[in-house]
Structure formats: C-alpha cells, structure tokens
Image (spheres, rainbow, N blue to C red):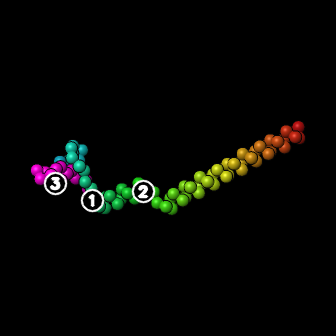
Amino acid sequence: MPKCALPNDNGFLALVETSVESCSGVIVITASDYEYLMGFTQVTAIEATAVFSGAFSLVFVSGFAMSYAVKMAVKLIKIL
C-alpha cells in the first residue's frame, strides 16, 4: 500500500498519515508492490525475441506477397 513520506527535522524521510493524493513529498510503496509493477513494465528477453522475430517474419511475408502480386500482374499484362 502506498504511503506518503516527508523529510523530518534531521533530513530523513518519515512516513506521515497524509493521503497519497495530497502528498507533497515522496510516495513510497512496498517491495511486493514494486515487483508487481515491474512485472508489467520490464521487457524480458523472451518478449523482445518474440517481437523481433515476428516483425522480421512480417517483412519477409509482406515482401513475398508484394512480389507475387507483381508477378501475377506481369503475367496478366503479357496475356493481354
């Protein structure tokens, strides 16, 4: 659960009972909340590999489809 932390007289951060919405200092979260949040924001190696290979495959497939369409158009023009 997020808490509000403000600097005290000694310069250290201290948790205060101010709501998070009206906090003018630093908002701190627990380690488990941080891990949960980072699970959605960090890109893993498997995800990066999947996106790269998918995009690379898309380039080859679209290139093949375009060249096939051009080949068919050339054949149609030669027939006419």
The label shown at residue 12 is 3
Task: Give left or right: position of 47 versus 54.
Answer: left
The answer to whether residue 72 shows anywhere in this view is yes
Magenta span of residues: 1-13
Q: Residue furthest left?
A: 9
Q: Is residue 15 magenta?
A: no
Question: Quarter of the image containing the C terminus?
Answer: top right
Residue at 63% x, 51% y is 58
Residue at 67% x, 48% y is 62
Question: Quarter of the image containing the N terminus?
Answer: bottom left
Q: Position of residue 71 (x, y in %)?
A: 79, 45
Q: Position of residue 13 (x, y in %)?
A: 18, 53
The label shown at residue 42 is 2
Mark 2 → mark 1, Cα distance in angstroms: 18 Å
Mark 3 → mark 1, Cα distance in angstroms: 18 Å
Determine crowd level at label 2: few under 14, some 14-19, many 20+ residues with C-alpha closer than 10 A.
Answer: few
State the SS at label 1: loop
Going from N to C along the chain, the mark reached first, 2 or 3, is 3
Q: The disc labelled 2 sits on which kind of residue?
A: Gln
Q: The disc labelled 3 sits on which kind of residue?
A: Phe
Image depth: mark 3 or mark 1 in front: 3
Task: Give left or right: position of 55 versus 71.
Answer: left
Which residue matches tag 1?
Answer: 30
Q: The disc labelled 1 sits on which kind of residue?
A: Thr
Q: Position of residue 17 (x, y in %)?
A: 16, 51
| Quarter of image, res 36 | bottom left
Going from N to C along the chain, the mark reached first, 2 or 1, is 1
